[in-house]
Image (spheres, helix red, strand yellow):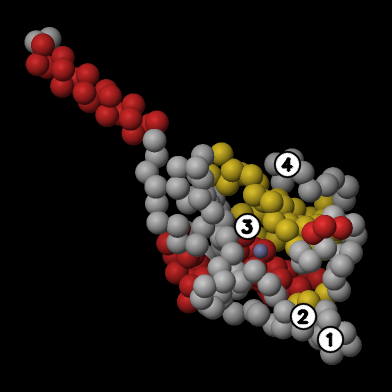
Amino acid sequence: MTTGLRLVFLMYLILILASCAKPKAQKDCGYVQNVYGERVSWKQNSPIKLFLHASIPADYEIGIRAAAESWNKAHRRQLITIESLRLAGGSPVRDGKNVIYLSSTWETEKASEQARTSLYWVGDQIQEADIRINGQNYQFYVTDSVSNPQAISIQALLLHELGHVIGLRHNDASPSVMATYLKANHDRNQLQETDLASLQCEY
Ligand SMILES: [Zn+2]
């Protein structure tokens, strides 16, 4: 190898190493980003399989499925599936399964949270998502809120939490199902333009 050729080869090698070492920052499109500024998502690894924990009341299931269906319809193919197998036992920790729980206890200092979605990712790839619904501080309704004006729509809440599951963060800047707070007795069941744009940007 001539010195010139050797130099070119070496530079090529350095370029490859450099591109491995530092991934490129991306436009956020409403997503959580990793330390390199890359969007964190499930990439091609869908449909995302979610299980219902035994703590979820049977009548919530229809609302949860309707929320998943909204994302699937917008995506024009299955992005999220709600598995029919119910899981008993277990807790919202990293265990390789994506599970929706109703928690009867909640941290006192976080009582205002209606629900919480925990995401676990490696690089820019989400590997697990767990949803906890705050059953200690809130009451929920599926189709009819009249009996309790303080109740929260389970479908609207899940539409938001499933947004977190696919990688979205809060958006209070434009109309979005990812707005931080869901009002009581409010059927926020329609994905907005921003939400659809986020979906298309990454999936
Ligand atoms: Zn949220």
Q: Which is in the foreground here, disc 3 or disc 2?
A: 2
The residue located at (73%, 58%) in the rendering is: 116
Front residue of this view, candidates 43 and 150: 150
- Whichever of labels 4 and 2 marks the residue nearer the N terminus, that label is 4
Task: Mark yes or no: residue 70 visible.
Answer: no
- Whichever of labels 4 and 1 marks the residue nearer the N terminus, that label is 4
Front residue of this view, candidates 16 and 32: 32
* Placement of 188 over or under 65, stated as above or below: below
In which quarter of the view is residue 114 placed? bottom right
Q: Which residue is mark 1?
A: 149
Q: Amino acid at mark 2?
A: Ala
How much space separates mark 3 and mark 1, taking CA atoms?
Answer: 28 Å
Q: Amino acid at mark 3?
A: Val
Query: CB under 8 Å between callouts 3 and 2?
Result: no
Element at label 4: loop
Query: CB under 8 Å between callouts 2 and 1?
Result: yes
Residue reaching furthest front? 109
Query: CB under 8 Å between callouts 4 and 1?
Result: no
The residue located at (51%, 39%) in the rendering is: 123
Q: Which residue is mark 2?
A: 184
Q: Which residue is mark 4?
A: 94
Q: Which is in the foreground here, disc 4 or disc 1?
A: 1
Q: Amino acid at mark 4?
A: Arg
How much space separates mark 4 and mark 2, taking CA atoms?
Answer: 31 Å
Horizontal and vertical percent position of residue 80: 61, 60
- Whichever of labels 2 and 1 marks the residue nearer the N terminus, that label is 1
Q: Residues within 10 Å of mark 4 (few under 14, many from 20)?
A: some
Element at label 3: helix
Horizontal and vertical percent position of residue 110: 79, 59
Q: Quadrant of ligand 1?
A: bottom right
Picture quarter with the N terminus: top left
How much space separates mark 2 and mark 1, taking CA atoms?
Answer: 7 Å
